[in-house]
Image (cartoon, helix red, strand yellow):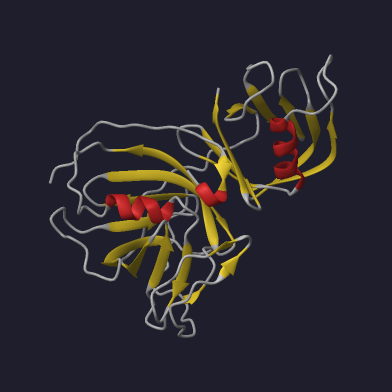
Amino acid sequence: MRRAAAWAAGSVMLPLAVLLSACGDRAEDTPPAAPVAAATTAPTGDTAAPALPAGFARADFAGVEGRFRLVSLDDAAPVDDFGESSVRFTQTTLSWDGCNHHEGLYIATGDSLAVLRGPSTLVNCPPDAPDNALSAILTTRPAIGRDGDGRIAIAGGGHRAILVPDGPARDSFPAPVIEGRQFALMLSSPDDSPVLLRVAEGRLSVDIGCADTISGRVDVRAGTLVLSDVESRACPGTAALSEAQRRLLRVLSADPAYVVGPNGDLLLAAGETAVAGRAR
């Protein structure tokens, strides 16, 4: 089926448990073998991790790059009316194809990942298309596992899938920088003004209702913001920090990972929380 050329995009902020799109073209043709494990539901944090198929052991997302062909969806062969379904990972972007094409940014967070969803084509797909299940897996804090045959499994959102390495990701973009730019974060300020984050000349500053409510020194290191000497203040006339300020402080104090997409989208992730934004 020919995919439509219409696109839709959005940016949101939410915990990784309810997650919401670059760079690198190195393929991982044969992921390292892992011990065989039974299908189980393992606790992770306050919630149970999704159950992986039998024969897959839990593993990290780090290093999962390349194109992966979908060979099993919810323990059955995927519907092939739309051509071959696949998932692609670069170092910072992911995409998945079923009836439609979907894109996003991602940050590996140990044995799961944070996803900022980006554009998708808008074909009206039948209910048995793999798109909804793949989207549910990839955007709801998926678990990942590997088996001894080089396959990987992903599970989340009430679904699970098995993927087979199928070459390089092919999609590759120059790495956009975060320095010297200003981003509007998807957070609410007390006066409904934009929450603005800037990184320039070794300093990070954030405006939340007034200028420089958060500021500090920042060292930008290969996808991580390492902060020091962080200061935070309430805006004049307010007695306490806003909820957006407290949330962002928790993220920034943990030296968050970050990704900037080719369209200026920004994703920050630390622990259980992700914050998204867009360049202005």
Residue found at the very far front of the displayed protein = 47
Placement of 207 over or under 39, stated as above or below: above
* Spot occupied by residue 267 in the image (x, y as percentages of width and height): 56, 41
Placement of 34 over or under 253, stated as above or below: below
Placement of 109 over or under 74, stated as above or below: above
Residue drawn 76% across and 40% down? 218
Q: Nearer the viewer, residue 132 or 260?
A: 132
* Spot occupied by residue 10 in the image (x, y as percentages of width and height): 44, 32
The quarter holding residue 86 reads bottom left
Residue 171 visible to an observer of this rendering: yes
> Relative to 170, is 41 on the left or the right?
right
Q: Nearer the viewer, residue 216 or 269?
A: 269
Q: Nearer the viewer, residue 92 or 41?
A: 41
* Spot occupied by residue 106 in the image (x, y as percentages of width and height): 50, 49
* Spot occupied by residue 260 in the image (x, y as percentages of width and height): 54, 39
> Relative to 194, is 113 on the left or the right?
left
Residue drawn 44% across and 50% down? 139
Which quadrant: the C terminus? top right
Q: How many marks?
A: 0
Residue drawn 16% across and 53% down? 82
Placement of 116 over or under 170, stated as above or below: above
Q: Nearer the viewer, residue 222 or 62?
A: 62
Residue 170 visible to an observer of this rendering: no
